[in-house]
Image: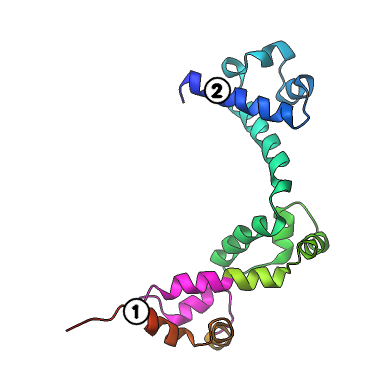
Amino acid sequence: MRSDALEGLVTAMLRYLNSTGFSARELAKYTGLTVDQLAEPAARLTASQLQRLWQLIQARMLPAISLSVQVRPLIQRQLAKGGVRVEKIAAELNMSRHTLYKRLKAENVTFAGLLEDVRREQALRYLHDCNRPLVEVAELLGFSELSAFSRAFKRWMGKSPAEFRSSVRPTVVL
């Protein structure tokens, strides 16, 4: 990154952090610089110091984002790896399972509801790929067997996965 662009970025980061309550002294201490050095940060900040500033920004911004919005991509990532464990997601958010449930409840959302929403969205994406077998789709979504996936899909969409797939498949005109 060019030095003038980097300087602009660092200046914006520091300005944001100042506006959210961090003093120049606190930021200097956090980055390991003096207040005077922090006045000319682009030339002095290392990659790890920039990363620490970014982490401060994330810590300030993430609470403003609803917890359910934060949980959805974590569920997607775990589904892709084979299964969803609420304890693991809670740990990634640095909270207990109980706290996760409680904070989701404050948003009128349940973990099970989020999991079901993510599974439904992913199912619709996967079913548009006609080369992907239904058994594979069920496995990717964390269902123990195809019949469990089929029942859930029928509840969500009012038709079986096979019926849905045939209705979205492009028709060939001869």
Helix, strand or loop for disc 2: helix
Residue 152 locus on image (x, y percent): 59, 83
Residue 64 locus on image (x, y percent): 72, 47
Helix, strand or loop for disc 1: loop
User: Of the residues shown, which amino acid type is indicated by label 2?
Assistant: Gly
Residue 37 locus on image (x, y percent): 68, 13
Could you classify mark 2 by the number of other residues whose Cα lies within 10 Å: few (under 14), some (14-19), or many (20 or more)? Answer: few
Q: Which residue is mark 2?
A: 8
Q: Residue at x 36, y 77 (%)?
A: 130
Instruction: Give yes or no for residue 125 being in the magenta stretch.
Output: yes
Distance between mark 2 and mark 1 Cα atoms = 50 Å
Q: Residue at x 46, y 22 (%)?
A: 2
User: Of the residues shown, which amino acid type is indicated by label 1?
Assistant: Arg
Q: Residue at x 69, y 60 (%)?
A: 68
Residue 93 locus on image (x, y percent): 72, 53
Q: Which residues are magenta?
A: 119-145
